[in-house]
C-alpha cells in the first residue's frame, strides 16, 4: 500500500534520527575509549622544580679503623683505603694485585685495611675462608694474615672453586702451624667477626665486591665500587694527597 505524503515525510524524519543517534553513539564511544587509553599527566620534573639541584649522596658510615684491623702500609698514614672483600670473588682476585702494587708504592702515605664481605648466596665457601684468614692472623699476626690471603687469591679459581681441604696447606705455606690452624678453624670462633664485617659493609653502602672506601686526610669518604686498576688507584691517591 502506498504511503501518503505525510507518512512518507514522517518516515524520512524517523530514519534520519535513527542514523543520527547511531552515529552519535559511535562517536561518543570512540571519545570514551580515547580518554581511557590516554596516558595520565605526569608531574613536573622534581629536579627542574628544585632548580636542577643534584640529590645529596648518602653518608658512608662504617666501623672505625682500629689496631685490631689487618693493615698494610703506614698505620699512621693520612689516607686510608678500607676494602671489603670476598676470597671467592673473581673481581676481588683481579683487584688484589692492583691494590697491592698501589699501596706498596704509597706505603708511607697510605694504609690499606682489609675487611671481610663474603657473598654467601653465591660463594658459600667464602665465609669459612674468611674465618681461615682470621685464624692465620690470630696465629701468625699481621704478616700471617696477609700471607694467607695473598696465597688464597693466587690459588683459588674463584666463584666458589677453592677446595676448603686446601686451607691448611695454604696456612702452612704462610708459615702457620697446621695443627693449630685446623683447631682454630674447626672451633668457628671467628664466624661472628666475619658476619659483623659483612653487615658493616652493607651499612657502608656495599652492594657487591670488592667494595672499597678511600678516606682522605680531612675525613672525606670516597666509594670505589668494583675492581679498578693500579693506574686508577694511583690517580685516586694522587688526587687526595696533592
Image (tube, rainbow, N blue to C red):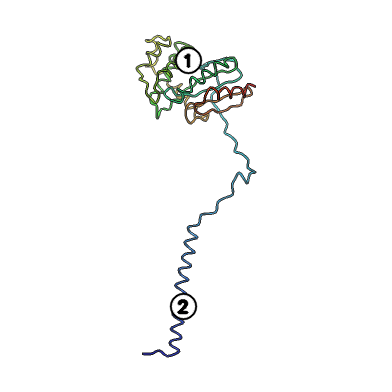
Q: Quadrant of residue 231?
A: top right
Quadrant assignment for the C terminus: top right
What residue is drawn where x is 63% and y is 42%? 52
Label 1: element kind: helix
Q: Give the x, y percent position of residue 163.
A: 35, 20
In the image shown, does 17 or 184 lie closer to the viewer? 17
- Earlier-in-chain disc, 1 versus 2: 2
Q: Which residue is mark 2?
A: 17
Up/down of 26 relative to 222, above or below: below
Instruction: Give neighbour class at mark 1: few <14, some 14-19, many 20+ (Cα, 10 Å).
Output: many
Up/down of 171 relative to 34, above or below: above
Q: What label does residue 45 carry, if any?
A: none
What residue is drawn where x is 36% and y is 19%? 164
Q: Which residue is mark 1?
A: 146
What residue is drawn where x is 43% and y is 86%? 8
Quadrant assignment for the N terminus: bottom left
Q: Quadrant of residue 60?
A: top right
Q: Give the x, y percent position of residue 192.
A: 44, 22
In the image shown, does 101 or 34 lie closer to the viewer? 101
Q: Give the x, y percent position of residue 55.
A: 59, 38
Amino acid at each position: 500500500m502506498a504511503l501518503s505524503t505525510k507518512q512518507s515525510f514522517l518516515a524520512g524524519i524517523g530514519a534520519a534520527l535513527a542514523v543520527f543517534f547511531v552515529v552519535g553513539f559511535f562517536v561518543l564511544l570512540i571519545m570514551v575509549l580515547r580518554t581511557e587509553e590516554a596516558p595520565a599527566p605526569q608531574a613536573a620534573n622534581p629536579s627542574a622544580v628544585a632548580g636542577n639541584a643534584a640529590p645529596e649522596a648518602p653518608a658512608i658510615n662504617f666501623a672505625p679503623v682500629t689496631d685490631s684491623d689487618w693493615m698494610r702500609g703506614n698505620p699512621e698514614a693520612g689516607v686510608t683505603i678500607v676494602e671489603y672483600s670476598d676470597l671467592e670473588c673473581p673481581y676481588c682476585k683481579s683487584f688484589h694485585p692492583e691494590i697491592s702494587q698501589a699501596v706498596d708504592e704509597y706505603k708511607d702515605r697510605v694504609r690499606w685495611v682489609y675487611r671481610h664481605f663474603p657473598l654467601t648466596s653465591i660463594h658459600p665457601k667464602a665465609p669459612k675462608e674468611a674465618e681461615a684468614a682470621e685464624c692465620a692472623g690470630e696465629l701468625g699476626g699481621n704478616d700471617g694474615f696477609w700471607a694467607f690471603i695473598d696465597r688464597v687469591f693466587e690459588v683459588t679459581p674463584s666463584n666458589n672453586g677453592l677446595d676448603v681441604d686446601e686451607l691448611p696447606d695454604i696456612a702452612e705455606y704462610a708459615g702457620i702451624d697446621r695443627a693449630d690452624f685446623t683447631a682454630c678453624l674447626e672451633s668457628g670462633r671467628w664466624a661472628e667477626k666475619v658476619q659483623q664485617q659483612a653487615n658493616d659493609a652493607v651499612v657502608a653502602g656495599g652492594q657487591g665486591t670488592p667494595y672499597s672506601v678511600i678516606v682522605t686526610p680531612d675525613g672525606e669518604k670516597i666509594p670505589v665500587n668494583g675492581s679498578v686498576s693500579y693506574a686508577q688507584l694511583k690517580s685516586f691517591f694522587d688526587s687526595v694527597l696533592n
